[in-house]
Image (tube, grey):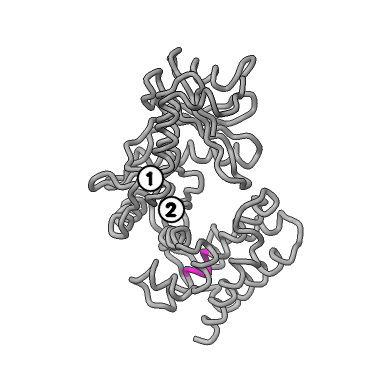
């Protein structure tokens, strides 16, 4: 991350709130680094980056209408959708806003999609769901950006399952619900189109065969559809009293199967990572979808894995250096296990 070099208070606040820390070790490391920054260590230890000419920061200063702004920039780990996220503060280090900036076709599309999604969700969703309020969105030198008001979060707490389920229920209640046969589901059409748009590979061919396999037996099966966040994870939410604060709406959609968000949360929260979560697909279903019979839960999981795999390949995550690696290392074995279990049942 980048922090303001000459404003120790703002630098310290940027580091302290760098991520949603859910371990004592991480919280301790952030607190120590923030304490050193408050003492001015960033001026002595950290390498500096000088900005020259008209920058995006200058543009934001003009857009927000405040000349007394300082900025911190978070990039995150390597992945296809990596882009700058800016923490915008006043001279005292108090948060004024957050901004996202696209840097290529993929991330520009994500930022524009989130701009539209956030307007709808913020105006329509009811509590306990709380979302950032969009301030302004636009383009700067061909790059899409979105500026949002900050939300009050508890950075060290993971929301309990009961609160998360109330949040997903509130989200789905805010938008129309529907149903369609699997073969006519819009999310599946997008997945198929994504695979058709990329070059053939072992992973993409494997995923195409899995789709054909599921359609052979479940083409006419109706599936309930509604709104979903798309990246429902502990990194994108925080409890605030009886409310659930949720941010990062880049993958929001209104036509996804019920249960996808909780499956995504369970996969991301597994102590052994995504590979550990998918090493036991049936256990994942029992944890994330306890209200469903196993036959229904595995159907939802198969749909989720197909959609996630297609998006992963279309975005070029492996080429961008994503930690999970090729689909054959984590997603495809789990999908095969689920499809085989469904065939036997």
Q: Residue 284: image x %, image y %?
A: 44, 70
Q: Is residue 275 above or below residue 12?
A: below
Q: Which residues are magenta?
A: 300-304
Q: Which residue is mark 2?
A: 232
Say left or right for 244 vs 257: left
- Are circles 2 and 1 on residues that touch, CB within 8 Å? yes
Q: Position of residue 310 (x, y in %)?
A: 62, 59
Outermost residue toward the bottom? 344
Instruction: Establish if 338 lies above or below 249.
Output: below
User: Which of 191 and 83 lies nearest the eye of the viewer?
Assistant: 83
Residue at (40% x, 40% y) in the render:
120
Taking 288 as reference, is 104 above or below it?
above
Residue drawn at x 40%, y 20% as measured from the top left: 90
Instruction: Check disc 2 and report its element: helix, strand or loop.
Output: loop
Q: Quadrant of residue 148?
A: top left
- Seen in the picture, residue 62 relative to 71 is either above or below; the reply is above
Disc 1 target residue: 246
């Amino acid at each position: 991350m980048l922090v303001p070099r000459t404003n120790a208070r703002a630098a310290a606040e940027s580091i302290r709130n760098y991520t949603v820390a859910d371990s004592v070790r991480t919280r301790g490391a952030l607190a120590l680094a923030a304490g050193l920054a408050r003492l001015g260590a960033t001026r002595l230890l950290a390498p500096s980056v000088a900005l020259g000419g008209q920058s995006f920061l200058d543009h934001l200063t003009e857009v927000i209408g405040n000349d007394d702004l300082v900025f911190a920039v978070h990039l995150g780990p390597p992945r296809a959708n990596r882009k700058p996220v800016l923490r915008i503060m006043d001279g005292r280090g108090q948060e004024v806003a957050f901004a996202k900036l696209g840097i290529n076709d993929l991330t520009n599309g994500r930022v524009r999609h989130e701009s539209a999604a956030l307007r709808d969700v913020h105006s329509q969703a009811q509590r306990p769901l709380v979302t950032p309020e969009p301030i302004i969105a636009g383009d700067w030198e061909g790059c899409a950006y979105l500026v949002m008001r900050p939300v009050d979060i508890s950075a060290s707490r993971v929301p309990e399952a009961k609160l998360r389920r109330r949040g997903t229920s509130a989200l789905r209640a805010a938008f129309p619900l529907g149903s369609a046969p699997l073969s006519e589901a819009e999310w599946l059409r997008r997945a198929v189109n994504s695979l058709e748009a990329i070059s053939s590979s072992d992973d993409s061919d494997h995923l195409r065969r899995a789709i054909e396999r599921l359609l052979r037996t479940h083409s006419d099966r109706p599936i309930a559809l509604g709104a979903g966040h798309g990246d429902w994870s502990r990194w994108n939410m925080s409890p605030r009293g009886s409310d659930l604060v949720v941010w990062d709406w880049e993958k929001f959609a209104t036509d996804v199967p019920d249960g996808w968000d909780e499956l995504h949360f369970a996969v991301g929260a597994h102590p052994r990572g995504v590979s550990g979560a998918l090493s036991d697909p049936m256990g994942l279903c029992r944890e994330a979808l306890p209200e469903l019979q196993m036959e229904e839960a595995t159907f939802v999981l198969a749909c989720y894995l197909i959609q996630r795999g297609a998006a992963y390949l279309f975005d070029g995550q492996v080429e961008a250096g994503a930690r999970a690696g090729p689909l054959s290392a984590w997603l495809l074995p789990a999908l095969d296990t689920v499809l085989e279990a469904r065939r036997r049942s």
